[in-house]
Image (tube, helix red, strand yellow):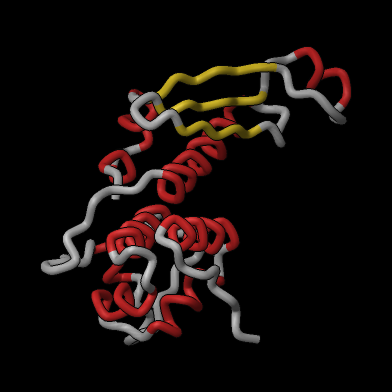
């Protein structure tokens, strides 16, 4: 998991460039006159996130920051040693009463859990069964976790394609 995901909001913002701009679209005169939209670029990774749904810059900033954390978790891979994989605390807490891996997208630990699972999947060359074994859970539970989150699912399939594996299919 990228170390920036564990930083406080203030420390993460210190690694970023923050830009404000006027959002286009509906919203009346105030939206067109005030720079309320926020774009945050994480300088070390080049990952960018925006928020422009509110007419208030103060409301848009935390939304953009939350989206930035999620984008870093999904787009930036960190090396993981499969042989002596140590489960991060955030990931350990995401196992709901046993084998099932669950975390709500609004949970503060969500980006860290997503990053840990995707990093492990990448370290296992996209093999979900190997990732499940390292996590101490079934292949089914890993696939179910990935399928519950659209952007995570898409990144997992990109990882698999890079390693010459077929795309995952959701069992209906």
Q: Nearer the viewer, residue 64 or 141?
A: 141
Residue 157 place in picture, x, y as percent: 51, 62
Please report the residue visible at 47 percent of the width from the left and 48 percent of the height from the top.
70
**In the foreground, 63 or 49:** 49
Which picture quadrant has residue 37? top right
Q: Percent position (x, y) of residue 151?
A: 56, 56
On the image, the x and y values in percent for residue 53 come to: 71, 36
In this view, which residue lies farthest toward the front?
164
Which residue does the image show at 33% across and 44% down from the upper left?
5
- Looking at this rendering, what residue extends furthest in the left direction? 84
- In the rendered structure, the answer to whether residue 75 lies left or right of residue 7 reads right
Residue 135: x and y in percent read: 27, 75
Left or right of 92? Residue 12 is: right
Quadrant housing residue 38: top right
Q: Return the residue nearer the eye: 42 or 123.
A: 123
Q: Going by the image, does 133 lie left or right of 150?
A: left
Q: Quadrant of the C terminus?
A: bottom right
Instruction: Name the outermost residue toward the top.
Output: 33
Give the residue displayed 30% in from the left and 39% down from the top: 4
Q: Can residue 90 be seen in the rendering of this structure?
A: no
Q: How many marks?
A: 0
**Is residue 136 depicted above or below 79 in this figure?**
below
Identify the residue at image location x=50%, y=56%. 158
In the displayed structure, 166 sits above or below 47; it is below
Q: Nearer the viewer, residue 141 or 160?
A: 160
Q: Is residue 13 visible?
A: yes
Tell me which corner region of the image, top left, top right, bottom left or bottom right, holds residue 170: bottom right
103 up-or-down from 77: above or below: below
């Amino acid at each position: 998991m990228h170390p920036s995901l564990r930083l406080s909001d203030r420390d993460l913002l210190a690694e970023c460039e923050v830009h404000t701009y006027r959002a286009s679209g509906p919203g009346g005169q105030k939206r067109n006159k005030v720079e309320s939209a926020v774009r945050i670029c994480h300088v070390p990774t080049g990952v960018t996130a925006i928020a422009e749904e509110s007419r208030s810059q103060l409301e848009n900033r935390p939304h953009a920051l939350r989206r930035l954390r999620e984008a870093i978790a999904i787009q930036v891979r960190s090396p993981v040693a499969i042989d002596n994989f140590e489960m991060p605390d955030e990931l350990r807490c995401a196992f709901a009463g046993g084998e099932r891996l669950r975390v709500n997208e609004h949970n503060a630990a969500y980006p860290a859990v997503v990053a840990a699972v995707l990093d492990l999947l990448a370290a296992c060359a996209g093999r979900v069964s190997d990732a499940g074994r390292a996590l101490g859970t079934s292949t089914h539970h890993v696939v179910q976790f990935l399928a519950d989150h659209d952007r995570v699912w898409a990144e997992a399939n990109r990882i698999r394609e890079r390693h010459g594996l077929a795309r995952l299919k959701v069992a209906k």
